[in-house]
Image (tube, grey):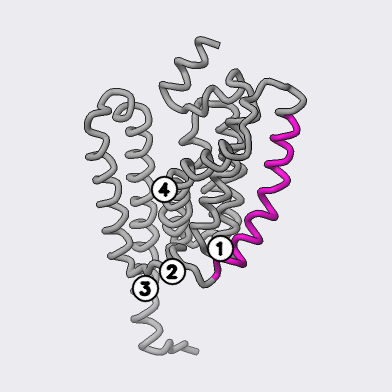
């Protein structure tokens, strides 16, 4: 007996699969290009061309903003929103607080940190916040959202975000390990309640805890790339 498939199914199914494959390929290409550019910035541009860093940042934002426009993403999609700030802050701080307390405890045991006072701690968090916002934007609003288009499990997206974040902090051992866990958690939190402001605060708090509590022989002054190698050789 001959099986007759509906004409619409026969003609539309290959097209839909083709569109899905094309979207995944485009997303993978975006991830690869941006990751390559960021590694180039860390290892070549930032150490050698400090007088033209603004050009590097301009190119970065030209790429990411064009990508957002092409994908029709809104500010809310990117986590630049206030409607869920309370929930996001609560979830983020509940996750990050134990880690920060452990870091502070280790610092007290070692007794070799900077021992920042309340005023210096607040100043450090405020100064670190914009950099944390920038990093979280790139991690979850750009890399994370593109990785989701690869039709893989959400947990795998979180794992890849952690891996990418860790790779961008090489060869600093402390930051590489911390960035892997932080990147994984940030991606998972962003899936639940996308808010960059909450993630940036967590980033600033944890960075301040690490920098102020642990000795420079461990933090390597929070440097990555060639700067970390130079510091490591001096320790």
Q: Is residue 50 left or right of residue 129?
A: left
Mark on residue 76? Answer: 2
Q: Secondary structure at mark 1?
A: helix
What residue sits 43% from the left and 53% below the top? 137
Q: Residue at x 36, y 63 (%)?
A: 23
Magenta part of the chain:
84-106
Determine contact: label 3, label 2, CB under 8 Å: no
Which comes before the other along the chain, label 4 or label 2? Answer: 2
Question: Sequence order check: which comes first, mark 2 or mark 1?
Answer: 2
Q: Nearer the viewer, residue 43 or 33?
A: 43
Query: Badge 3 local density, few (<14 within 10 Å), some, or many (20+)?
Result: few
- Image coordinates of residue 218 in percent, x first then y, are 61, 22
**Mark 1 = which residue?**
191
Q: What SS does tag 4 mark? A: helix
Residue at position x 45%, y 50% in the image? 133
Residue 217, disc: none
Comes first in the chain, label 3 or label 4: 3
> Toward the viewer: 230 or 83?
83
Q: Earlier in the sequence, mark 1 or mark 3?
A: 3
Tag 3–tag 4 contact (CB < 8 Å): no
Q: Earlier in the sequence, mark 1 or mark 4?
A: 4
- Residue 166 at what x, y percent from top left? 53, 37
Q: What residue lies at 41% left-to-right and 48% top-to-bottom?
A: 134
């Amino acid at each position: 007996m001959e099986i007759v498939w509906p004409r619409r199914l026969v003609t539309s199914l290959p097209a839909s699969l083709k569109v899905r494959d094309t979207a995944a390929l485009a997303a993978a290409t975006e991830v690869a290009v941006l990751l390559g550019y960021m590694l180039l910035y860390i290892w070549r541009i930032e150490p050698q061309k400090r007088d033209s860093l603004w050009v590097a940042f301009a190119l970065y934002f030209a790429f990411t903003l064009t990508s957002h426009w092409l994908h029709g993403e809104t500010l809310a999609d990117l986590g630049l929103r206030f409607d869920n700030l309370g929930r996001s802050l609560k979830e983020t701080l509940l996750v990050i607080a134990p880690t920060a307390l452990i870091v502070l405890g280790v610092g007290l045991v070692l007794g070799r940190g900077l021992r920042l006072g309340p005023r210096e701690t607040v100043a450090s968090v405020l100064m670190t916040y914009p950099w944390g916002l920038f990093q979280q934007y790139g991690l979850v609003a750009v890399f994370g959202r593109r990785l989701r288009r690869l039709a893989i499990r959400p947990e795998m997206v979180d794992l890849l975000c952690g891996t990418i974040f860790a790779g961008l902090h090489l060869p600093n051992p402390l930051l590489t390990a911390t960035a892997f866990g932080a990147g994984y958690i940030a991606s998972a939190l962003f899936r639940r309640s996308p808010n960059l402001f909450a993630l940036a605060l967590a980033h600033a708090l944890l960075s301040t805890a690490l920098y102020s509590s642990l000795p420079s022989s461990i933090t390597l002054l929070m440097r990555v790339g060639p700067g970390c190698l130079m510091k490591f050789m001096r320790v």
